[in-house]
Amino acid sequence: MFGIRKYGKVICGVLLIAVFALSAAVPSEAAKKPEYKWKLGIPWTRPAVDDNLKLFCKLIEEYSDGRIEVKYYPDGQLGTHDETFHAVRRGDVTMGLFSAYVNLIPGGMINWMPWSTENWDAAKILYKHGEGIIWKATEVAYNEVGCHQVFNIMYGPYGVGSKIRPIKHPKDFDGLRFRVSASLASVKVFENIIKNAGIHMSLETIPWADLYNALSKGVVDTIWSMWPSLIDERHGEVLKYYSNLNWTWDCNNLVINKKIWDELPQDLKDAVHKAAMIAEEKQFEKQKSIEADYIEKVSKIPGFTLIELTAEEREVFRKMSDAPKIWDELAKPWLEKAFPGENMQDKMLAEIERVHKEVEAAKSKK
């Protein structure tokens, strides 16, 4: 009997080992491979957003219970701006962070029409996901080219930097070489200023990523830039003056291939949206709060001068830029086609005016 008991214990031990081995061989729910493997690429160096985009990727994995895995590719690892954008359109890259250049997105000028957004409080309303008037129009623009807006990242207002002289009046641009991009509405601002101020200024199209070298080598001597770029992308090192013109607002759009988005189950869409809204809010508050830090850093750059423009001085630039004509020439034809019979341009301009009045009224009560 003793031998039988001992033999039985051996059998039980072997069985237990076999069960453990079998359970180890069968993957648990948590260890299963993700159903979706996505790539998120951004074409620039953006230190201020890297941590938040990494968080966004982790939150998608968390909220999807591991069904979606997102790999983040910063600093142009997947190519230039346009190369990455076309990769997202094809579906080779799932998501990307872009500027809405009209050579890529015909209705993209709506994202940053001149003088339409002048402060953070107005931006939060106008670009609000699913509700803001600018978001609604920009979403249609991205849908036309096979993309869907996931969330927006804002960097704040644009100013004008110069290597040659302070810019306090449109005539100060005379004789300068100014860098422009494929942001057609922004280009029109300076074309109109040249015409209305009666000056000569050449406009040179140069990719954003090449600005530092272009300035340092003297290819251009004047650019539009913003507080974060003066530090993070070192524009302040190769400029001597910066005027806080605040003539347009910088908003990058994180978008996803629309076919991939449309085919995603609703519960996973909800997971991505939840992660996106957390990331958007965190980045908005971060950028808004650190603007003062950037301004302080800029003010301490050796040999660098900040030009504080008054409201009256800005108004001269506004009038010479002929913003209403830019709306009529660029925005109206696309808006009428994209929103037939809705009189969308008038609606947008009225809403922009309403929002700014609301923001100013709220400030005056404080």
Image: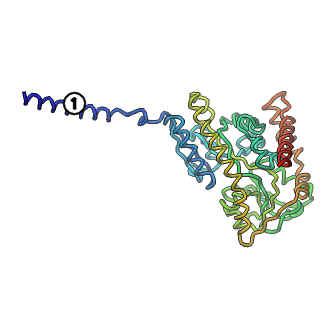
Can residue 146 be spotted in the picture? yes
Image height check: is 267 above or below 210? above
Left or right of residue 352: residue 40? left
Q: Nearer the viewer, residue 30 or 241?
A: 30
Helix, strand or loop for disc 1: helix
Residue 199 horizontal/vertical position (percent): 90, 61
Pinpoint residue 89: horizontal percent, then vertical percent. Answer: 62, 38
Q: Which residue is mark 1?
A: 15
Residue situated furthest bottom in the rendering: 303
Q: Residue 117 location in percent, x, y?
A: 80, 47
Q: Residues within 10 Å of mark 1 (few under 14, many from 20)?
A: few
Note whether residue 45 is visible. no
- Lateral position of residue 252 relative to residue 261, left or right: right
The N terminus, quarter of image: top left
Q: Height in image: 25 above or below 117?
A: above
Choose between 283 and 187: the one closer to the eye.
Answer: 283
Q: Amino acid at mark 1?
A: Leu
Q: How many marks?
A: 1
Which residue does the image show at 79% across and 65% down from the upper left?
306
x 87%, y 36%: residue: 346
Which residue is at 62% across, 40% downward? 276
Give x and y (percent) for residue 169. 89, 61
Colouring scheme, one of rainbow, by chain, secondary structure, one colour: rainbow
Would you say 7 lies left or right of 99 here?
Answer: left
